[in-house]
Structure formats: structure tokens, C-alpha cells
Amino acid sequence: MVDAALSGQAGVPSPCIDICRLDDQGLCIGCRRTIEEIAEWSRASEARRREILRALEFRTTGKTAG
């Protein structure tokens, strides 16, 4: 297995499922991220990635975890 630091991947996994098209609201139909969140992901901190994931949960279910 490739070390996460060497591969450029951090501990928070990407929500990408390789279905990369934007809907009429500007959200990816695969992962439900905005184009800004997709572009930001590779350089985002762990904390910011968790914020994005919480926003995705709210977008898909209408409620937050916890």
C-alpha cells in the first residue's frame, strides 16, 4: 500500500464516486459537491474536508450527524 503522505491523499477520504457531472443546481450528481468544493479538495485541510462532508450530509439528507 502507498503511504498516504506520499500519494497526496490525506486521512479524510474523497466522496468522489467517479460520476462527475453537474446538475442544474451546480452540484455533482455523483458526490453532491459544488465545483468550488471539488476544486478545493486536494489542498483543503483535514478540518475543512470534514466541513465539506458535513455539508454533503446535509445536502443529501437535510440533517446533520450527531
Image (tube, rainbow, N blue to C red):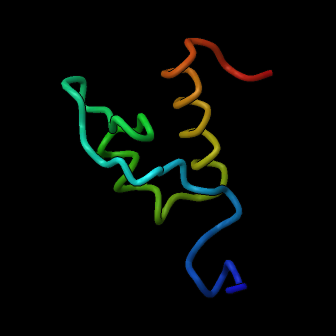
22 is higher (above) or lower (below) than 5: above
Residue sitting nearer the eye, 18 or 40: 18
- Point out residue 23 in the picture as x, y percentages from the top left corner: 23, 30
Tell me what residue is drawn at x 55 percent, y 12 percent: 62
Tell me what residue is drawn at x 57 percent, y 16 percent: 61
Lateral position of residue 20 relative to residue 48, left or right: left
Residue sitting nearer the eye, 16 or 50: 16
Q: Residue 2 appears in which quarter of the rendering?
A: bottom right
41 is higher (above) or lower (below) than 65: below
Q: Quadrant of the C terminus?
A: top right
Q: Residue furthest right?
A: 66
Q: Residue 40 appears in which quarter of the rendering?
A: bottom left
Tell me what residue is drawn at x 33 percent, y 38 percent: 28
Residue sitting nearer the eye, 45 or 33: 33
- Point out residue 65 in the picture as x, y percentages from the top left corner: 73, 23
Residue sitting nearer the eye, 11 or 46: 11
Lateral position of residue 34 relative to residue 56, left or right: left
Q: Residue furthest top?
A: 62
- Point out residue 41 in the picture as x, y percentages from the top left corner: 46, 56
**Number of residue marks:** 0
Q: Quadrant of the N terminus?
A: bottom right
Lateral position of residue 34 relative to residue 41, left or right: left
Tell me what residue is drawn at x 55 percent, y 55 percent: 14
61 is higher (above) or lower (below) than 35: above
- Point out residue 31 in the picture as x, y percentages from the top left corner: 44, 40
